[in-house]
Amino acid sequence: MTATRFWLALPLVILTLVVALLLSWRPLDRFTSSAPPVENANVESVRLTGGLISLTLRTDGSEPVIVAQVQVDGAYRTFTATPQTPSAWLGRTRIDIPYPWISGEAHHIALVTGTGVVVNHTIEVAQETPALDGTSLALLAAVGTLLGLVPVAIGLLAWPAMRSISQGGLNFLLALTIGLLVFLLIDTIGEGLEEAAETIGRLRGPVLFWAILALTTLILLALGRRQGRAPEGLALAGFIALGIGLHNLGEGLAVGAALATGSAALATYLVIGFTIHNVTEGIGIAAPLARERPRLVDFIWLAALAGLPAIIGTIIGTQAVSPLWIAVCFAIGAGAIVQVIIEVGALMTRRAGIGQLLSLPVVAGVTVGLAVMYATALLV
Amino acid sequence: MVDGEACGEFSRRGFLRSVAVASATVPLATGAVLAQSAADGHSAHSGRDEGSNTVVGEVDYAKNGFDPHAILTDWDKGAVSTNADGRIVREWTITAVDHEFEVAPGVKFAGWTYNGRVPGPTLRCTEGEWLRIKFQNGSTHPHSMHFHGIHAARMDGVPGAGLVDPGGEFTYEFEAKPFGCHLYHCHAVPLKRHIHKGLYGAFIVDPDPLRHPEARDKAAARLLGSPENARWQELLMVMNGFDTNFDDENEFYAVNSIPFAYFNKPIRIDKTRPVRIYLINITEFDPINSLHLHAHFYDFYDHGTTLDPTNRMIDTIMMCQAQRGILEFSFENHEPGLYMFHAHQSEFAELGWMSHFEVV
Ligand SMILES: [Cu+2]
């Protein structure tokens, strides 16, 4: 026992000594003595309100990154920084610039740090960040409902038609679900990695994205099988709804962000596109229930689980969320989708045998699922 | 009166600001608000801070070792003696030093300088004198002093003729000619880098009235220290820029190095006395720079090498790099107030080359 403890402690002690030595002796200083401090800074979010531009800046470096001066459209402007000196390691500071920004036009911002480094950020289309008062909350909730809840509910309406379906037909439907899930997975990963790439280097956004994705899949797989059996029927439908719901959270964020930063016209098309697109998701959720006898209340919570996150996402999305959190949301969504792809695949394998996985209805189902999702995505 | 109003506005804004933002804020330069509100004429009509086009905070001139307001008038006349032939000899010692200074509030710039200041010392002499400039290189790079004047090839301050290695020394010697508003700068390569880092300064040769009997009074008015010169308010303005992130574009523009220095703290002008500006453009990277004076027109002497204006009644002069000249005007018939002058490249103006005369 004592020996075990000793051998556990020894590596720790040696590691501590090595770190202490590096910090006190600083052998690398002769290579870096003439180098200016490393400065990384990244504009994470922008809020535009009446006559004021507010930026959230993520900073990181060997010394605190201090924004000394601020240019808007190539002119120095008065501003405040809160706090003025962020921490060196993953610091955060808010820059408030009183400026008569012009709705619908682009503005270029350049932050000059204490060492003369310039951090550029472009506001592509300036648009007032919606205030979260009663009216706009109701409006955003309505958009979220149209985006998530309504189409899923429409899709679920196809359930009665599935009840009399043949085994081949059911396989087709399940395969279609896989097809649409694969499409959503690719879409979610793409968007998530894009957001992850916008985070500052030290946060290692892409690595974090993949790790959270894998963890989510593992946790959901374990949860689904905690009674020793793979989820089927209502439970499987629930997991599909959860996966789609988490994905819709990301979609909501995208629409919210479009409302906040893009043009209203773009947001309208996004909503129409997503609504049509998401009807397919309702069909996917209903597919495992074809041989079941669910109650009406089950349909309600399935629709809520898949659809309501879109509302939350839309509201949050308008409030200039940091790309790191959007990437985390997408990672969780993608992880949940991987889990349901595995479980739907497992269900089909159990029902029809592994050989059936490459049968005509299944291949056709996957193809149609992908094709329908792609085609409706063209509307977005 | 204007001050009182502006101060009231400042404190009210400051109060609102400190309430709105709980923790540390960057204080606005008092001068900035003063200048801005006075210039725009919009007094406090709303509680909202509308911001203004200037830098935030103040440069520590004491720590920098030079003050743009002092540079306006600190003519360096050197040490004067008379040689065996009875000729006046003027001598200076100039040292090149690497010097990091605050180029704008809070922004450090690793400069290369003459005597620790940018622009370097304003060397002022009279035509016909024998000049001796002892140049010591205390920097970590080879440098030189290349004078815009008339001199021998071996005194040209270029590689092979007066380029000095770190720790070395060289004495440039030549006659002060022609009279005019000139400059000197380092001519080591790469030229762009050595100039924009800060190695330049003014070299002013006053005309000798005895040599210009046909225009004796005009020459005397230009001769520093003469009774005719005493009434003139003479100012040195070196238009320059700084590229702080080495992308071959200037982040800051100014006259005498510090952006908005004369905008936030105007240059005081006595309206009863005429004004003469020695204007030099040493801006790197941009092909031209300019000076536009508000509400007024001036006479211009290109290179300062004539006693009669080369341009009369203009309010904007455009200069390429190393071009320079003398501006003369008077506010005698103007009412007191703040009069702007700035580069009429809006880009340069909004990035720092924006100034005020406060005519009293
Ligand atoms: Cu040099």
Image (tube, rainbow, N blue to C red):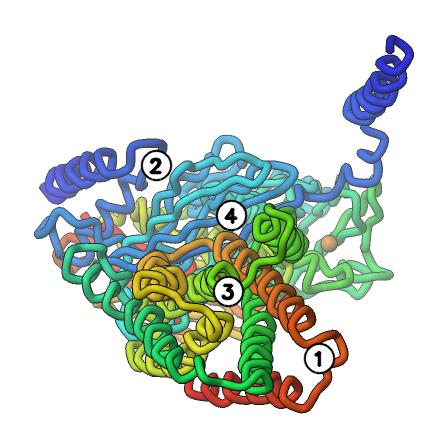
Res. B25 mark: 2
What is the distance, in whole Å, between disc 2 and disc 3 at their CAs? Answer: 59 Å
| Marks 2/1 same chain | no
Residue A349, how many percent across, how many down?
Answer: 69, 71
Does dot 4 land on a helix, a strand or a loop?
strand
Circle 1 residue: A357
Secondary element at tag 1: helix
Does label 2 lie on the same chain as label 4?
no
Number of residues whose C-alpha sits closer than 10 Å to that of mark 1, classed few (under 14), some (14–19) or many (20 or more): some
Q: Secondary structure at mark 2?
A: loop
Label 4 close to label 1 by CB (< 8 Å)? no
Between B329 and A4, the one lying in front of the other is A4
Residue found 84% across the figure and 14% down from its top: A5
Type of amino acid at the residue the image marks with label 2: Thr
Left or right: A135 in relation to B67: left
Taking the image as four quarters, which one is ligand 1 found in?
bottom right
Calculate the distance from the C-alpha at mark 3 to the C-alpha at mark 1: 19 Å
User: Which label lies toward us, 2 or 3?
Assistant: 3
**What residue did someone put label 3 on?**
A233
Dot 3 or dot 1: first in sequence order is 3
**Residue drawn 25% across the image and 61% down it:** A130
Q: Between tags 4 and 1, which lies in front?
A: 1
Residue B219: mark in rendering: none
* Badge 4 and badge 1 both on one subunit: yes
- Closer to the eye: label 2 or 1: 1
- Tag 4 residue: A58
Q: Residue furthest top?
A: A2
The residues tagged by marks 2 and 1 sit, at their Cα atoms, a distance apart of 64 Å
Residue found 70% across the figure and 41% down from its top: B97
Q: Earlier in the sequence, mark 3 or mark 4?
A: 4
Q: Residue at x 81, y 43 (%)?
A: B169
